[in-house]
Amino acid sequence: MGSRSELFKVKTLAEVAETLKPYVQSFYERSEEVSLTESFGRILAKDIKVTAPVPHYRKSTVDGLAVRASDTFGASESMPALIQCLGEVYMGIAPVESLKPGEGMLIPTGGMLPEGADAVVMVEHLEDFGQGLYGVGKPIAPAENLIDIGEDLSEGEVIISRFTKIRPQEMGLLASQGVIFVPVLPRFKVGIMSTGDEIISPEVNPAPAESRDINGYTLLGQALEAGAEAKYYGIVKDDAEELRQMLQKMIKENDVVILSGGSSVGVRDFSAQLIEELGKPGLLFHGLALRPGKPAIGGVVDGKLIFGLPGHPASAMVVFDCVVRPWLDVSVLRNQSYPEPEGTLTQNIYSGSGREEFVRVRLLPDGKDWRIEPIRGKSGLIRTMVLADGIVHIDLDTEGIEAGKRVKVRILR
Ligand SMILES: Nc1nc2c(c(=O)[nH]1)N[C@H]1C(S)=C(S)[C@@H](COP(=O)(O)OP(=O)(O)OC[C@H]3O[C@@H](n4cnc5c(N)ncnc54)[C@H](O)[C@@H]3O)O[C@H]1N2
Ligand code: MOO
């Protein structure tokens, strides 16, 4: 790495992602198996193909009479189609009967249609003439009131792709395929440390000029929310040797190392230098075209990602959200964004050109719409994050957005 001014050549978010990607491919080639009951929130390591059609038999969706639809064509109230009932279908038992023209079988919701049947007339639309003879007062279309073989899931299709985060519905689908051991990415091990001579543990009463550690906990929460196995390593003073030792330990024990504070150009801001010294390729960016978050740093040492986030609490959280989280929830590779609600901006937002701006906002209900209210306050104020429901992203080349314009909000989870 070159001179200090070169180090501070800021990168865009897209450039950061491209810079780091080649070094961490192996993260995403790992796989472990967890039981289906433990799979919630995990990230699939392989595509899931349908191997068993669902359902694998024609299934009634109503209580009624399984019929051949063509037998009811032309039926009317005054001239009902007459169907002779062969008996009853039982739940969980495949009927052995085969319907010939003019024949039907009583069937419960979920029962298997007998051979020859292609529709089910609801019980309330049947007229019981006694001795198993039923009248159907209007025609029924083929495939009405049933779920056909493979209608839900058909064999061979890829129904959930690799890197999908498993939600309750994916758990259900895996169950339907008999997948009781699920291939998932191992949870990312994330180590978090706070730095600064002025930072003290929350149980301590701060003396003047001291501050309780906030970032250690916001970042821990964010890492857990992103599905990581996260560990808080505590506070390290602004001492190069202490920092080096802690960083080495954390690099050894984790996939991703996060520190906050000490990212700017102050005399005691060692972290960038340390990342550069600890191994190859070392420091890969120092400074982002981002607000808040400009002084963020990052690099790779021994195949582990290291991020140095700004000390200001809101900045640290915003940088985690847009720089760190995508590696943990794999959205960086999935190219898939989360749905973003839209609403009307209540105040102008200004943005210095040449930087991506992340504005903390509140969502206020407005009938069926949302009003999007920017939260004023410096990036050193944790309250701005507590008040925030989400973040409005302003592109690099946009100067700002006027009140009254429609904007999208990335929800803070
Ligand atoms: N001359 C310049 N000064 C600063 C610049 C700049 O470009 N030129 N950038 C400013 C910006 S923007 C930020 S953000 C900060 C980032 O500074 P550091 O990352 O080096 O962080 P510190 O100096 O250690 O701390 C900043 C601030 O945050 C408080 N802090 C730090 N850690 C925690 C924690 N774990 N919990 C709660 N609060 C924390 C710290 O006490 C400071 O008040 O630099 C600006 N300066
Ligand atoms: O960008 Mo600093 O990260 O504004 O507070």
Image (cartoon, rainbow, N blue to C red):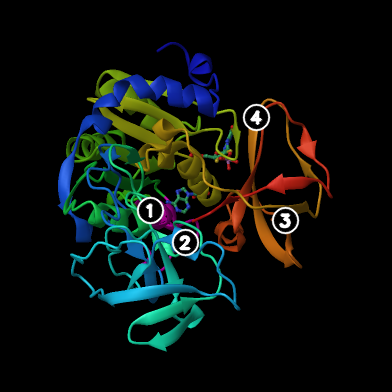
Give how far across and how far down residue 137 sits, in percent: 54, 75
Give the distance between the C-alpha atoms of the residues marked 4 and 2, in whole angstroms: 58 Å
| Magenta stretch, residue numbers | 198-223
User: Do callouts 4 and 2 mark residues in contact (Cβ within 8 Å)?
Assistant: no
Front tag of 1 and 3: 3
Give how far across and how far down residue 222 sits, in percent: 41, 52
Q: Is residue 108 visible?
A: no
| Residue 373 sits above or below residue 50 on the image | below
Question: Is 213 one of the magenta-colored residues?
Answer: yes
Q: In the rendering, which numbered label is found on residue 144? A: 2
Q: Is label 1 within 8 A of ligand 1 (CB to nearest ligand atom)?
A: yes
Q: Residue furthest bottom?
A: 130
On the image, numbered disc 4 is attached to which residue?
A: 355
On the image, numbered disc 1 is attached to which residue?
A: 216
Front tag of 3 and 4: 3
- Give the residue type that dot 2 points to: Glu
